[in-house]
Amino acid sequence: MTTPQHAVVLGASWAGMLTAHVLARHARSVTVVERDVLPGRPAQRRGLPQARHVHVLWSGGARIVEDLLPGAIDRVLAAGARRVAFHEDVVTLMSHGWQHRFPARQYVIMGGRPLLDWAVREQVLADGRVRLRQRTEAVSLTGDARRVAGVEVRDVESGAREVLDADLVVDATGRGSGLRRWLSGLGLPPLDEDVVDAGIAYSTREFVAPPGATSGFPAVNVAADHRVRVPGRFGVVFPQEGGRWMVTLSCTRGGGLPTREEDFLPYARSLRDPLVADLIGPAEPITPVFVSHIGANRRLYPERLDRWPDGLLVLGDSLAAFNPIHGHGMSAAARAAAVLAGRLAGDGLGPGAAHETQREISAAVDDPWIMAASKDLEYVNCRNRSTDPRLNDTSGVTRQFMDLIAAKSMCSRAVSDVVTDVISMSSPQAELGSSDFLALMQRDGAVAELTGPPLSREELAIVNLQPRSAALR
């Protein structure tokens, strides 16, 4: 069996639907199993609570999605999402200061997570090659340690169980995946797991944006300075479809996240710069405050097992889940789907190929994993339960090097371009250690540091703010 006749994908979120589409190009039939009832429009659902907070799709991931599913990104943009040039259309207070708004090198897609999921889901289901089983959850895998033969599922409402036979089962159920338990049921040893947990928590509220602000005003990002050894506090104002701003305030462990409406604005004023508070102070709120504490970086290592059953793959948040503040989850899922697409278009999934394919998928999420986990380690009270030597550098050399890069990139266009390529997952992280980049760090000149947010008079007028003259663009 090099091409699955029947594939079952567990989970109908972003990762699951991209995977189902890839499989539908090759398999005779594809079934997607989903516990929720999926809305027929962009709307929140119970099984995706993090969708109430800001999401971005980096350009590296967006290009993959467009390659796998042509027209999907245009569909999102037509529905009101915004293509934000990075750094040109973003005002960012980094750990080391204000980032210059250099001409765009990459971009992010900013829109509500329900919109992003809906656009992909509707397009995948529209061609009729994927069958969706809603209100159904996976209970266990069938087969043995050598080969998975299907999955036992349960109807959420009736409790009735049945077995779905499959040549390939893909776990894309997310952070709540039962994979480790399922593998134990097949007689396989426990999977290694790394967790880097900065105790991140999120508080989000939506506002009516001033007229013209969602298209004529930049996205805003105020980050904490990890060098100040106190819990980090963050705030973002991102444009959304429907003339809205989504404002997410967050903190690391001990940062005192606001959970009540009356505390939201005062918390925004406690950030390193008052820009977020200045923007939302006069704005009309249109939602209550939504709070989430789901933010630890967690990764499983199926590739480390000496044996891995044919007929099984794991990807998305089931494999590696990231602190959402870094915006890498959806792009990492797209990278994994692209690996599977390449495998099916090439040698296929013959005997032993599942383990090799899983190694390739794990390698595809390594860059976003190490970027997110190493960044969170910078904050006080971060709990590190990882075996990865890159995340256990007690010498401080890695952190010092990253601080040098951060300080240089905010004032050097050439350095910023390389860093942006890496962050957007358009270039490998290894680029930051290349001889060319190290030489660039030494020779490239830098413009003067900014003393305030780089906003033009025209942009300030849109939001009715007075200029800070020393920081005008």
Image (spheres, grey):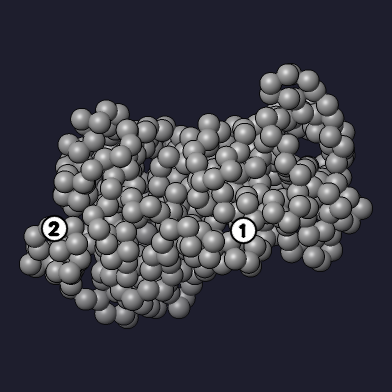
* Residue 258 image position (x, y, % from top left): 27, 32
Q: Which residue is mark 2?
A: 464
Image check: 356 left or right of 103? right
Image height of 152 relative to 121, above or below: above
Whether residue 468 is visible, yes or no, is yes
Residue drawn at (38%, 68%) of the image: 85
**Residue 88, quarter of the rendered image:** bottom left
Task: Give the amino acid type for the residue marked by disc 1 in the picture.
Answer: Arg
* Residue 82 image position (x, y, % from top left): 41, 61
Circle 2 SS class = loop
Which is closer to the viewer, label 2 or label 1? 2
Residue drawn at (73%, 36%) of the image: 133
- Category of crowding for the residue at label 2, using alpha-carbon neighbours closer than 10 angstroms: few (below 14), some (14–19), many (at least 20): some
Image check: 389 left or right of 19? left
Q: Which residue is mark 1?
A: 335
Q: Quadrant of the C terminus?
A: bottom left
What is the C-alpha distance between the residues marked 2 and 1?
41 Å
